[in-house]
Image: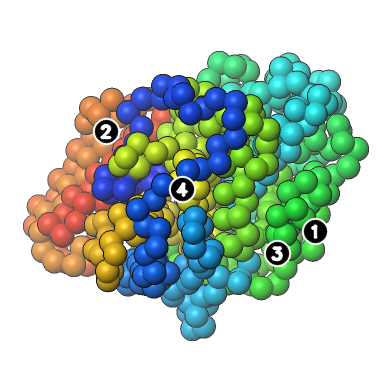
Amino acid sequence: MRRFSYVTIFLLLLSTRVFAWPSHLDSLETWGTKPLVGHAALAILGDTSLPARLQAALEATYNLTPSYDKHGVAASVIVPGYPQWSGAAGTSDGTNPMSAALSFEIGSCTKTFVAALILQLRDEGKLSLSDSISKYLPRYPNVDSTITIAELLDHSSGLYDYLNDDPAQRALRDAYENDPAKHWTPAEILDSFVGPENFKPGQGYRYSNTDYLLLGLIADSITHQSTANEVHRRFLSPLQMSHTFCSWEDSIPANFPHNYSDYIPSIHRSVDYYSIDKTAQLTMANTAGGMVSVPAELARWSQALYIGQILSPATTAEMLNPSNYHRLTDGFYYNLGTMLEGQTSTGQLIYGHFGSMVGFVTGMATIPQDSVTVVVYVNSLTDTVIAANYVDALLYQILNSPQNGVAAGPEITEAVSVTPNPVRSLTNFWFYQPAMGPAELSLYDDLGHRVRRIRNDGTPPGEQQIALNCAGLSNGAYFYRLKTPQSVKTGVLVVEQ
C-alpha cells in the first residue's frame, strides 16, 4: 500500500445537517476587494455549554471509532466570543492520554504557508504569477522551464509527483527504510526522484508535491533568504506560533505522539512508526509538507489566513473566490494553496487544507463568514474518514448550537481501509462487520453513474475483505458506497492507470 500521501483522500464525507458539497462554484458578491473579517453572526454566542460539548463530542466520536484504529485525536476550535478551545481524546502511545500540546507533522497543510509567502511576494511586486520558473530556477530533470508560478500554485503544471507517482516508491523507501536520518535538499530530490511529466503545463489539474518544492526554491531565489526564515518572520513570529517549525531547516522537536499506519487486517493492528528518525521524512517533504505544529497554533494560522489578516484584501478575495477553484484528479477543488472543502447547510463555504504523513493526519477548516475554525490531528493513517468524523462532530456542536446538554451529532461514518489507493488495477476494501448480513460495494463516477457493483450475501461477522477490479476505468476520482445492515461507509477512490 502507499505509506505516504500528502494529498490524502480526505474529503469531508459529512452529514448534510452540517455540510453539503457545493453544487456550483459561481462567484459571490462577498468575494470583493474588502477583507473577509467574518460577521460572527452565530446563534451559539452566549452558550456557556460549548466547551463541554466540544470535549464530549470529541470523546463520543473517539468511542465510536473502530477498535483497530482507536489511537488518539487532538483538536482546537476558534469561535468568536469564546476563548480558543483545545482538547484531546484517546492515547498518544496506547497507554498515555493524548495531549493537544504534542507536536504533529502537518503534511500538506504546509502548502498554505508557502502559497501565502508567494502571494505576499507577488503583492510586493517581486514576482508575477505569470512568470516562468526559468526566471528564478536552474533546469532540473523532467521539469519544463516554461511552467509558470500560477501553474505550480494550482497544480496545473503536469509535473510528476516525486512522492506519489513512483510505483517503486523509491523516495519513500529512502526516507523510512534505507536512511531515515539523511537530511535531503530540494536539489537532491529534484535530481533523483522526478519522472516524466503527466501532461503539458496548463493542460490539466493534478496534485503534485513537486509543485510546492519548486515554489519554495523560487521564494529562496527572490528573497535571498530561506523559505523557513521567511515563514518565521512573516507568519510564525507575528502570530506567536512558537511551537510551529519548518523541519527541513529548524530543529525537529521530540514531543511527538506515536504515529500508526499500515493497518494489517490479519493481526488487527497498525504499524507504529514512532521509533523511526524523522529527519529524512520531514526534509524530503520540505516545502511541500515538512512543517510541524500543535493544534492551537495551526488553528490560529487558518483563522488569520482565511479571514483576511495575512494577505491583502484583493489577494484574500482572489484566494477565496469560488469561481477560481478547479477540480484536481483526486477530487479536491483547489486554488492558490487552498482546498474548497464544502459548505454548511446555510451555504457558508468552508476553506482549508488537509495533510498526512505516515501515521499523522491533519485537517484544518475555516468558515470565513463566521470566523469559525476547526483543526484536528489524528495519530493514525489507517482511514482518513475517521479524521473527517471529528471535524464534523465539532462543527455540528458549533453550527447547530443546542443550548442545553450534548445533542446527538451526525451519524458516524465507520472506517474502511482501502489499499492501494490510488489504484491501478486491483484494490481491496477491508472493514469490520459486527453481525451476519449482506455487504454491497458500489463505485460511482463523478456524474453519479454506478460503474462497479459487488454484493456478498450472508457475510458472517468479523473482518471482511472485498476485492475490486478497476481495470478499464478512466483515470480520476470515484466515490464508493459500502453498505452493510449496520452502516453505510463512503469515501473516494482514485484510479491512476
The structure residue drawn at horizontal position 41% and vertical position 47%, both measured from the top left corner, is 41
Q: Are marks 4 and 2 in contact (CB under 8 Å)?
A: no
**53 relative position to 212: left or right:** left
Instruction: Tell me which label, 3 or 2, sits earlier in the chain.
Output: 3
Q: Nearer the viewer, mark 3 or mark 2?
A: 3
The structure residue drawn at horizontal position 31% and vertical position 48%, both measured from the top left corner, is 18
Q: Nearer the viewer, mark 1 or mark 3?
A: 3
The amino acid marked with disc number 1 is Asp
Instruction: Name the residue beneath numbered marker 2.
Output: 444
Instruction: Name the residue beneath numbered marker 4.
Output: 40
Instruction: Name the residue beneath numbered marker 3.
Output: 243
Q: Position of residue 366 (x, y in %)?
A: 49, 46
Q: Are marks 1 and 2 in contact (CB under 8 Å)?
A: no
Instruction: Name the residue beneath numbered marker 1.
Output: 250
Q: Nearer the viewer, mark 1 or mark 2?
A: 1
Instruction: Tell me which label, 4 or 1, sits earlier in the chain.
Output: 4
The C terminus - image quarter: top left
- Residues 147 and 119: in front is 119
Q: Nearer the viewer, mark 4 or mark 1?
A: 4
Q: Are marks 4 and 1 in contact (CB under 8 Å)?
A: no
Instruction: Tell me which label, 1 or 2, sits earlier in the chain.
Output: 1
